[in-house]
Image: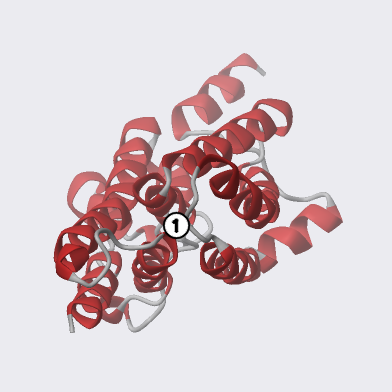
């Protein structure tokens, strides 16, 4: 019963559309009608700038992290002394599903990258560090947010298979299986980005202020 309650809480937390709320109450726009139409950090940053984008990341990241932390507290009374990686990863997956398919927005939400990182930080933080490091390295090289996310997602299943097993004695096959399924889902959510990457038309990430500065310099 505690697991079912944890999954429900995770889904409802994940469904909170922070990007949409920030766009509406801070920027005065519906971000679904601007830029790429996505409610995640990247589009909010394109529409409103770095601060709204950063806040969107923190809140989307935080809701998945909080869902896993709450689950850890609820499940601590279960037969095992502490929830296994796979159980916590399943809870995080429900937060990510809530973000992608939010009940409050007729199941049309974001792409789940911020929630993915928040989940990993709560479940097993070295995986989150690998994910963040991969994203940052790719972004520093290519300046393309979607490409950075896709490369990170491709790497995470293999890392989740090897890294926790090297550093703990807990089984990790369930963690790896859930991460592999999440990576496939999140890459599918980036299918339009993949098409633009193949066509060479995927844009680099710039905030409105940087776009205005570049236009003034031309």
Image-based side of 170 in relation to 194, left or right: left
Residue 190 shows up from this direction: yes
**Above/below status of 16 relative to 142:** below
In this view, the residue farthest toward the top is 217
Residue 45: percent from left, percent from top: 43, 41
Image label count:
1
Residue 29 in which image quadrant: bottom left
Q: Quadrant of the N terminus?
A: bottom left
Give the side of residue 75 with respect to residue 86, left or right.
left
Q: Foreground residue, 83 or 16?
A: 83
At mark 1, the secondary structure is loop
Residue furthest right in the image: 199
Q: Which residue is mark 1?
A: 34
Nearer-the-camera pick, 40 or 82? 82
Q: Residue at x 62, y 15 (%)?
A: 217
Q: Nearer the viewer, residue 30 or 217?
A: 30
Q: Position of residue 141 (x, y in %)?
A: 72, 27
Number of other residues with Cα within 10 Å of mark 1, as a class: few under 14, some 14 to 19, many 20 or more: some
Q: Residue at x 34, y 68 (%)?
A: 91
Q: Residue at the location (58% across, 49% down)?
A: 165
x and y percentages locating residue 75 in the rendered image: 20, 67
* Residue 3 in the image: above or below residue 160: below
What residue sits 16% from the left and 59% below the top? 73
Position of residue 63 in the picture relative to residue 196 (left or right): left
Picture coordinates of residue 8, whole percent (x, y): 23, 78
In this picture, residue 15 sits left or right of residue 144: left
Quadrant containing the C terminus in the rendered view: top right
The answer to whether one can see residue 205 in this image is no
């Amino acid at each position: 019963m505690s697991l079912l309650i944890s999954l429900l809480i995770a889904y409802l937390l994940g469904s909170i559309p922070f990007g949409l709320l920030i766009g509406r109450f801070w920027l005065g726009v519906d971000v679904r009608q601007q830029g790429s139409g996505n409610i995640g950090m990247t589009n909010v940053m394109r529409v409103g700038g770095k601060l709204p984008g950063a806040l969107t990341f923190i809140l989307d990241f935080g809701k998945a992290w909080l869902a896993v932390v709450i689950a850890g507290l609820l499940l601590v009374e279960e037969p095992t002394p502490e929830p296994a990686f796979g159980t916590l990863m399943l809870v995080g997956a429900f937060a990510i599903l809530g973000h992608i398919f939010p009940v409050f927005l007729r199941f049309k939400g974001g792409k789940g990258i911020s929630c993915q990182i928040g989940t990993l930080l709560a479940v097993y933080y070295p995986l989150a560090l690998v994910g963040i490091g991969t994203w940052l390295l790719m972004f520093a090289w290519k300046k393309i947010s979607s490409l950075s996310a896709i490369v990170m997602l491709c790497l995470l299943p293999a890392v989740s298979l090897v890294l926790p097993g090297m550093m703990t004695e807990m089984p990790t096959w369930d963690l790896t299986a859930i991460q592999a399924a999440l990576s496939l889902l999140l890459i599918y959510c980036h299918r339009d980005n993949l098409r633009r990457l193949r066509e060479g038309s995927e844009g680099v990430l710039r905030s409105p202020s940087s776009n205005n500065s570049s236009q003034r310099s031309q």
